[in-house]
Amino acid sequence: MSAPQYPRVAALKTAEAFRRHLHACGAALEFDDTLDTAAASPLARPFELDGVRVGNRFCILPMEGWDGTADGHPSDLTRRRWERFGISGAKLVWGGEAVAVQHDGRANPHQLVMTAETQPRIAALRDLLVSAHRERYGANADGDRFIGLQLTHSGRYAKPTDRSEPLTAYAHPLLDRRFPAGVRMLSDDDLERLVERFIDAARMAWDAGFAFVDIKHCHGYLGHELLSARQRPGLFGGSLENRTRFLRSIVEGVRAAVPGLRLVVRLSAFDMVPFRKSESGVGVAEESSGPYDSAFGLLDSRAEDLDAALADARALLSQLEAMGVRWVCVTAGSPYYNPHMQRPALFPPSDGYLPPEDPLVGVARQIAATAILKKDFPGLAIVGSAYSYLQEWLPHVAQYNVRHGMTDFVGLGRMVLSYPELPADVLAGRPLQRKQICRTFSDCTTGPRLGLVSGCYPLDPFYVQHPDAIRLKELKGSA
């Protein structure tokens, strides 16, 4: 692959330079030139909704560490990551980990699975996070945390063993051909049984001490794919009512079984057609033989009518609000088929492509979508995503967005792998630790795609010394 053609964010050292580049690349982002004092910062302001009080506006987003055991238990690496979530200072933990509800729903052979056998050790992850937070910030910091667990089935991207075992929502005109060994479409009976597994897993999460569960509907996994199943026959396809039946059935079932457990949803609010790597290495949109209707919230990259693309999301959020699901995390697309829009990065993972746009454009797009939905649904608690690529400018954009009501919380994913204490440093008014800032080298994704554990190999001293770092370097060198 040729070198990226976009300037590095770290090189934009002044507000003037950053603003000038945003204008030049067409990224419609606003930010505060200076950060408020700790006491006055919008990011330090508590948030309250439906009897839940969250002490600040930072949120830890759910990730998959590829470091559980073969039978779905946490490992020492998993525990280390959750302990670091605890010291981050963020008061909202949106799942912490994507946990499969059954074995065939794992995205990798080392993903956590919620079962009667694994539940005590998954509960211990929460206890470890709480203990680390209390030890760092004191017992008085206990009362304003909100900690949940993300529940998932990976569907098309299931890989519970060393090979893909895709379980799809419908026959996809472009994505099916990426699986040469074929795919299996889940039947209505399969989905009804899976609803029961989500309910069982939610009950175990409640017993483990989690305050909420996230019913994952993003990034191309099963819940998200069902939302675009317009061509699927039967109870779970066609109309919006049918395409949301899976989600609604889980909500209704969990409410009946565990009335005290709160329910939240992480949603890919818009999507694009799948992209592939061109001969130049840059991502290009795949061509469809006819009108493309296999997306939930299709954004045409040529027209970029984001407001129109969010019509699907508005319809779903109206349903969620009517059901009393009032916490929503907004994301977009999928890391598998259009990663440049889902998690903007300058450097692609080993199986990815060079970005077809300045990654700041992708950041701005997600922030704009989040702001539109927050304006349209002021009664929902909204978490924004895609902030990591902002790097040094992350606190400046985050402060502006929260101050102006464009989001309620700022979600952090990759950034906390390299720099877990960024929220604490910002909230305390301390300078950022520049050597720990995520630069989106994507090794945290390349490693797992090559069968290694996920971690920040370039910047986290622990992973710099990890045996997989040597193996990763060898594999990248031979690619």
Image (cartoon, rainbow, N blue to C red):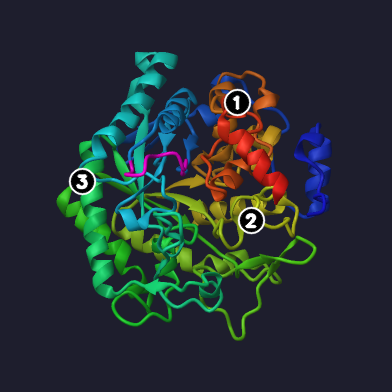
Q: Which mark is residue 203?
A: 3
Which residue range is magenta in the image? 64-72
Element at badge 3? helix
Query: Measured from the top left, where is residue 140 in percent x and y?
Result: 36, 15
Element at badge 1? loop
Q: Which mark is residue 49?
A: none
Question: At label 1, which amino acid type do we have?
Answer: Gln
Please give the name of the residue rendered at 34% of the width and 31% of the height, measured from the top-left corner. 125
Tell me where residue 155 sits by quadrant: bottom left
Q: Residue furthest left?
A: 257
Query: Measured from the top left, where is residue 224 in percent x and y?
Result: 43, 63
Question: At label 2, which amino acid type do we have?
Answer: Asp
Does residue 85 show up?
Answer: yes
Q: Is residue 71 magenta?
A: yes
Q: Which mark is residue 351?
A: 2
Q: Where, quadrant-wise, is the N terminus in this rendering?
A: bottom right
Between 278 and 377, the one lying in front of the other is: 278
**Vertical side of 455 occupied by 153: above or below:** below
Q: Residue furthest bottom?
A: 290
Element at badge 2? loop
| Residue at image mark 1 | 465
Between 477 and 395, the one lying in front of the other is: 477
